[in-house]
Image (cartoon, grey):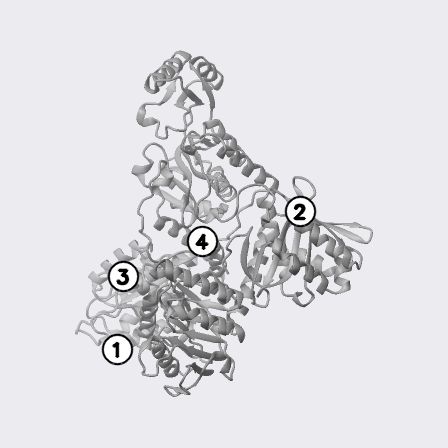
Amino acid sequence: MTLVNTAVRADVLLADGAVAVIRSLAPDDAAALHALHEGVSDEAIRLRFFAPSRDAAHRYVDKVLGDQSTLALVAQERGRVLGVATAEPMDTSTCEIAFLVADDARGRGVGTLLVEHLAALALERGYTQFEADVLLENHAMLEVFANAGFQASRTPDGSTVIVALTTGASDNSRALADAREFAAEARSLAPMLRPRGVAVVGVRTDGTGIGAAVLGSIRSGGFAGELAVVHPRASHVHGVDAFPSLKDVPGPVDVVIVCVPAEHVLEVIEQAAQIDVRAAVVVSSGFTELGPEGASIQRKVAQAARDGGIRLVGPNCLGLLANSPDVRLNATFSDNVPPSGGLAVATQSGGVGIVLSDLARELDLGVHTLVSLGNKADVSSNDLLAAWYDDPTVTAAALYLESFGNAAKFARFARRFAERKPLLAALGGRSAGGARAGASHTAAAATPAIGVDALFAQAGVIGCDDAEDLARTALLLAEQPRPQGRRIAILSNAGGMGVLAADAAGEAGLEVPEFSAGVQAQLAALVRGTTGTSNPVDAGAGVPPEEFAAMLEVLFASGEADAVLVLPVATGVTDAVASMDAIAEARARYPDIPAVVVPLGGLPTPAGLTAYRTTASAVRALGRVARYAEWLRIDHVSADPTPVTELVAHRQAVRGLLEEDLGGGWVTPPQAAAVLQGYGIEPLGVTVQGADAAAQAAQEQGFPVALKLADPEVVHKTDRGLVRVGLRDQAEVRAAVSDFEAELGRAPSVLVQPMATGVEIALGLVRDPALGPLVMVAAGGIATDIWDDRAFLVPPVSRTDAARAVRTLRIWPLLEGYRGSAPADVDSLESMIAALGRLAVDIPEVAELDLNPVMVSPSGCAVVDVKLRVDRPVGPDAGAPRQLRPVVRS
C-alpha cells in the first residue's frame, strides 16, 4: 500500500490483509474513541490504566482530545476505530507512549502499525525516545514493542517494567516491517491472484465491447473457478449465467471485473463492498488519463475501494492473467495466453502486456501472472513484489513501469526481492526532461535515466531496454544457470559471425578472453585447417557435426569460460540439422555452464537448447544476467543510520538556515562546513574578511595557499578569476584579495586554504523530483563536465555501494596506484560517499551539494571546494510535514 502521509494519513494493510488507515486523531473522533474504551474488556482497561476504571479511561480520552501537545494516531477500518496510540511529551526529547486496541482486533498487527507510525511522527517532531510503563503481565503490549524492532531497553520497576525505545528506524525494524508487509500483501492480494469465483460487470449481449471480449477470454482460457455475469435484464450472457446485481450471484465472488463506463464504476465498487468482494479489476477507461473530471471519478472510486476493503487493479488497464494451471484466469481483452510458468509480470501499459504475452508464446516462456496496472489507483508494482516474494511458484518477476509511486520503497523492496529471485524491469519515458537545469555540476549531470540506472544497479534489478529485452533475458534466467563470471567463449562455423559476436559481447560488458595454448591445441587437433582457435573459435564452414560438438565440449571443459555462445550457420557444405542435434547432445553433458545458440540460415532448434534469433539479443541477455550474478555475490551490507539525537540536531540546524535571507538558498562556506562537520566531513581552510585577515590566515595555514571567493551567490568562481592557487607569501595574498575586490566592486569574504594534492574527485548531491536524492561520484576538478566520468547512487549508500561506484570510474586506476604511484586512501573516500548518503536521507532540505574537488591522496581526503544550497523539500521528500512542533488537531 502507498503511504499517503505518515503524519496525517497512511493506507496500510493489517496482518490478515485487510485494508486499514492510520491517521491523526481528529476532534470528531470523540464518540468513536469513547466507544473504543467502553467496548474493550475490563482486563484490557486494567492493563492499560493499571486499574479497572472506565472513568479513568474516559477522562484520558477527554484529556487527549483537548491536549494539543500530545501526538495521537488512530487505526481505522471501514469507518470503525480499531485502536489508538498516544505519545505525551515528557521533555524536549522523550514522550510517554501508550496504546489501546479493540479486543476483536488483536492479533491483526494494529498495535505494531500504530507504534511504527507514531515513532515516525515523533521523530519528525524532534522526539528521539519513547518510554512506556507496562505491567509485567501485559504480554501483548510488550510483544508489540518487541515486534516493532526498534532499539529498546527494559528496566524492572516493581510490578511494572519501563520500556525505552528510540524513535529512529533501524535495519532490524525496517526488515521486520517489510516482512510483515510482504506477508500482509500476499494475504490481501490472494483473492485477486488465486480467485475461486469471478463476476464480470459490463458485458453487452450483442457481443461487442470490452466486457464481451474479457468474458470471451475468461471462457476460452478455461477458468477453473465459478464464473458469473452481472446484467440487469439477461439470465444468460454468451453461455454464462447472469444475475441482476452482485448480491444476487450465488457463488463466491473473489474478484469483480469491471467493464462499465467510467461514470458507473463507483456504483459497482460500492455494491462489491456490500457483499465483501475483496478485489476488483477496473478495465474501463475514462479516468485520470482524460483530465480533471476523470481524475475526480478515479479518486472517488479509489476511496470507495479503500473504505470497502477492496484491492483495486487499474483503472484503464488490460486486465489480469492468473496463469497457474489450477486457476487459468485470463481476465483480459487479449486471447494471447502464454504457457504457464514461473515469471510474474506487472506492466503499466496494456500494450506492452500484450507484446510480452506474444513474446512469451513465441519463446515458450512460462508466465505465472500478468497484472496490467493501468492508472495505479491502488495496486502497484511494490505491492505485487511483496506478494510474490514468498510465493514458491513465482521464480522471477518482470516489470514495465512509466513512473515510481514511491521510489525509495521500490528500491528497498526490489533489493529484497532480487536477493531471492531475479527481477527484471524496463522503464518508459527515461529521457523526459533531458538534462536538469541547475547551477552545480551535480545537478546538471543528473537526468531521469541516470537516476533509474543508479537505482537498478544498487537494488540488483536487471534493467532492460524494452519488452523484447525483458522477455529474452527472462528466457535465459528460466532455462540456463547463472554464469560465474563475465568470460564468454564464442564458437561458430562462420568466422565473420564470431568476430561480430565478440564485438557485441564487449559492448554488453562481457569478456572474450584468449584461450590458453593447451585449449587452442585441443581445438586445433579436432579439425585440420581450423582457421581460429584463440576465441572466437572458427570451426570452418565444412566442420562435420561430431567435430563441431567435440569442439564445444572442449570449451565447456576448459574452465576458461563462464558462458558459451554457439553460432551455427547453415552452409550447405555439411549436415546442418545433424550439427544442431550434436550441439544439443554436447550441451546436455555440461548443464552447469550457461550456453545459448543463435542458429542462422534457417536452422531448426532441437529441444534442450536456449536459442535466440540474433547475436545481439543473445549477448545482451548474457551480459545482463552476468552482472546480476555478480551483484548476488556481493555482501550487501546495509548503510549505517545516523543516531537519532544527532539526526534531529542536524535537521534543526539546516531548517534554521531556511529562515535566513539566503541568495537562492546558497549558504556561506562556514555554514556549509557546519552542516558537513556533522557527518565527519571537514572542508579545508578558513573563511575571513579582508586582505589583512587573509594574509594572517595564510601565514597560520602555511604557504603555499589557495585563495577563493567565499560568496555563495557566485557558483562558478574560476570563470571570473576568483580563485588563486600557489600563493607563496602574504604580499601575494593581499594582491589577490585586491583583485577580487576590483572584480566584485566590494570587499570580499575569502576562503584561505593550504594547497592540497592528490587525485581530483567530485562528490555531490541533488534531488530528482521523482526519485528523490542522488549522490554523485565523478572525476573532479574544473574539467569534470568534460571528462563526463560519473556514477550515481541512490541513498542510503552503504560502503559496498560506494566501493562499487568508485571502481566504475574510468579514473579508478589513478586511485588504485598508476605506474608506480602510491595508492590513494580509497577507504576514506568511500566513507565520505557513505556519509553523503546519510546526509541526503537525513536532511531533505539540502537541495544541492557539490564537493569539487576532493583531493584524494595516500594520506586521506581534502575537501577543497564546497557549494551547498538549501530549500523546502520537493518531490518524494515533500510528503511529511517539516516543522518541529506538536500536531494541531483542528
Helix, strand or loop at disc 1?
A: helix
Decide: marks 3, 1 in contact (CB < 8 A)? no
Circle on res. 578:
1
Q: Which mark is residue 407?
A: 4
Q: CA distance from mark 1 to mark 2?
A: 85 Å
Q: Residues within 10 Å of mark 3 (few under 14, many from 20)?
A: some
Instruction: State the CA–CA distance, disc 3 to disc 1.
Output: 25 Å
Q: Nearer the viewer, mark 1 or mark 4?
A: 4
Give me the C-alpha separation between circle 1 and circle 4.
52 Å
The dot on residue 616 is: 3
Q: Nearer the viewer, mark 3 or mark 4?
A: 4
Label 2 environment density (alpha carbons within 10 Å; few <14, some 14–19, many ≥20):
some
Residue holding disc 2: 67
Total residue callouts: 4
Badge 4 element: helix
In the rendered image, residue 94, in percent from the top left (x then y), is placed at 67, 43
Q: Earlier in the sequence, mark 3 or mark 1?
A: 1
The extreme right residue here reads: 158
Give the amino acid type for the residue marked by disc 2 in the picture: Asp
